[in-house]
Amino acid sequence: MTTIERTVLGAGIDRVDGAQKVAGRAPYSSDVTYPGMVHAVLVRSAIAAGTIAGIDASAAEGEPGVLAVITPYNAPRVARGPESGFWRQPPPPLQGLEIAHHGQYVAVVVADSRERATAAARHVAVFYRPGDPVLALDDPRAETVRDPFGSDQTRGDSAAALAAADVVVDAEYTTPDETNNPMGLFTTVAAWDGERLTVHDATQWPAGARAVLAGAFGVPEEGVRVLAPFVGGGFGAGLRVWPHVILAVMAARVVDRPVKLGLTRPQMFTGVGHRPATVQRIRLGARRDGTLTAIEHESVQPSAVNDDNIVESVTQVSAVGYACPNVTTRDSVRRLNVPVPTSMRGPGDAQGHFALECALDELAYEIGVDPVELRLRNYADVHPELGLPWSSKALRECLEVGAERFGWWDRHPTPRATRRGDILVGYGMAGVSFFWFQQPCAARATVDREGRAFVRSAATDIGTGTYTVMTQLAAERLGLPVDRVRVGLGDTDLPRAPMQGGSGMTASMGSAVHDAAANLIQAFLDLVAGDIAAPLRGRRAEEVLAADGGLRLRSDPASGESYREILERHDLAELTADGSAAPANPQELGLAPAGPFAARFAEVHVDADLGRVRVARLVSVVDAGRILNVKTARSQIIGGTVGGIGMALLEETVTDPATGRIVNGTLGDYLVAVNADVPDLDVTFVGEPDRFNPVGVKGVGEIGLVGVAPAIANAVFHATGRRIRSLPLTLDKLL
Ligand code: MOS
């Protein structure tokens, strides 16, 4: 294991932005102020469906400090922003009288302080003509959209294979709505200067926000600057351009002053997305020895009546996770009068793995094959859909190393057989095959005469460690110590970058930084090409390596020059190069792009009388390709695992079935895992650098969460003999 680790791990240096953050010097959007800035506060709908019959804003307008009350009756018209390359944004706010969900914005109050705006907002009288909301997935009025993500798969003949199978597992699994709840409350500050717009936002995608805002307000993209150098967490909530962002910009235009709009925690439950619930039916067909012959996996999830698309393929893992000749996967969406959903950490895969990995556990007990062994017997050595070898895959090592570290083989195979006093002890595990994701990205690299590098891109770091790992990567590629490298992010004036989402940023931006660094090295070689005495004169890039603050000859590392020497000779202060990268073509490369893989092993203690579940141990072994920083990567896995424990045991957004109001929309009522819920977490990285991108990385963000819930649910079954197929695993389900 240590040998494997040594090949993939990059030094676990501290976060380069850590001191700035703990000292309060990192400017989050909520910290931004402008001279003359005023504050906007939102008014939300008290019904889930129907129309607004009238709004009386006169009392609010008369409150002290109030500058404007914006409602659908007086709001400027804005367009629905463009698709901006990935998905369509939610419809812009205050453009009509229709109510699509409880909590929809119906007015904005702008005042000279947040407190005065909040006080005045209570005086906005909204009159409704209520409709009858569609709130249940099985409501026949709900419109159904089949294969909304274009990801449904059919291979072989799963129906025939199920009919012929020795053993069939057929079960329904459900997962609830969950809410992302980043710690930082989303805040937007908007300032117009004529037709130019500056926006400070809590976004995972500055370039996406810029495109949408330019489209919405009919101004050129070049005139819009979105800044998000620091974001207080996202978990997917910051992927889309939400109505409050449009409203902050609209308010700034209406009052002709810079405007700050900060969401409250309850507004974070209705206004920035959530993980949609799923109802999943899964059927596994197998031979007696555990060889899978068929998988059918169907999932239905809610979406909003006014939302066009989200990306949340729940069943795809069943098409690619294991070698199985006959597979059918189907996702569909039903439109309800609920807030617009969004991706939440490990979107789709988090829910899909719960059904697949629990159903495999059911199969393992049914046929008496060890759960780890069952997964190894169905190991997908090549990509089951593409038939190509994986760009990298160490799921086998994840399973074997994890079983060893956990002590899996000491487990008593019989459920409810291990007891310590009142405590039932259970061991459970899950395998994880997470999706692959990389997007086009650009970056710029500069080296100056002091031997310092500055690398930048319009990406964000939402707490994942992007500043740090890009510093390390640039330092390595340019041959500089990390303390000579600075990384700039979170500004749309920088080269265009994709969303920080889908665990794809390190591969996307890393590949762009790799390219920019190579181009910069080439620029230095071009510069010295005519230098009579230069040791690097006429050398090609393949002949040199970046080391010791400059370029050295591979054949003779003592020969070469520092960047400083070259720049001084040419009387240049600095040299800059741009780079960009897009994902490779699998067919051209002859490789199936692999996402990360993992195995998780959980020990749970269940109180035999009370049904209370405690997670006693959790072992994760992860193949995320090359790890640029073992410390930040481990932190990602630990953070995700804590989220996974919450998903398993606690998290559930509850909507009142009569009114469509979220009843637990505060952090006092919506339970997340806290320190007392979390044991020491054991994390190990295995595998080798991935071959699909030049940096060798795979996503390490979201896989921390995926597979935790099924491992825990399977451990609960082993402890109690009770198969709970609906999350969260609350004690009432175990009594
Ligand atoms: Mo992630 S749910 O793609 O921010």
Image (cartoon, rainbow, N blue to C red):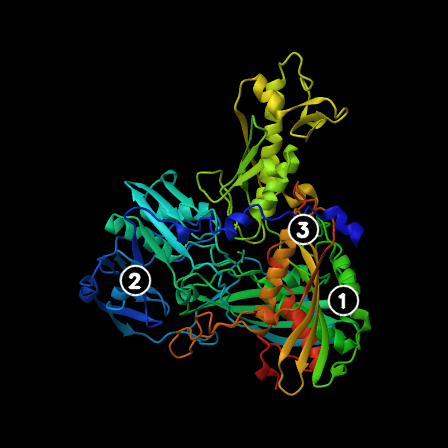
Q: Give how far apart the Cα atoms at labels 2 and 1 are.
A: 53 Å
Checking the image for residue 406, the label placed there is 1
Q: Which callout, 2 or 1, points at the residue further toward the start of the chain?
A: 2
Residue at the spot of label 3: 630
Are the residues at dot 2 and dot 3 in contact (C-beta closer than 8 Å)?
no
Residue 219, image x and y in percent? 33, 42
Give amino acid for label 2: Glu
Say which of marks 2 and 1 sits in front: 2
Q: Is residue 368 left or right of residue 546?
A: right
Neighbour class for label 3 at 10 Å: few (<14), some, many (≥20)?
many
- For the residue with label 2, is its CB less than 8 Å from the closest atom of ligand 1? no
Pick whichever, 549 or 78, lies toward us: 549
The image's mark for residue 115 is 2
Could you say which is closer to the camera, residue 432 or residue 506? 506
Residue 549, quarter of picture:
top right
Name the quadrant of the C terminus. bottom right
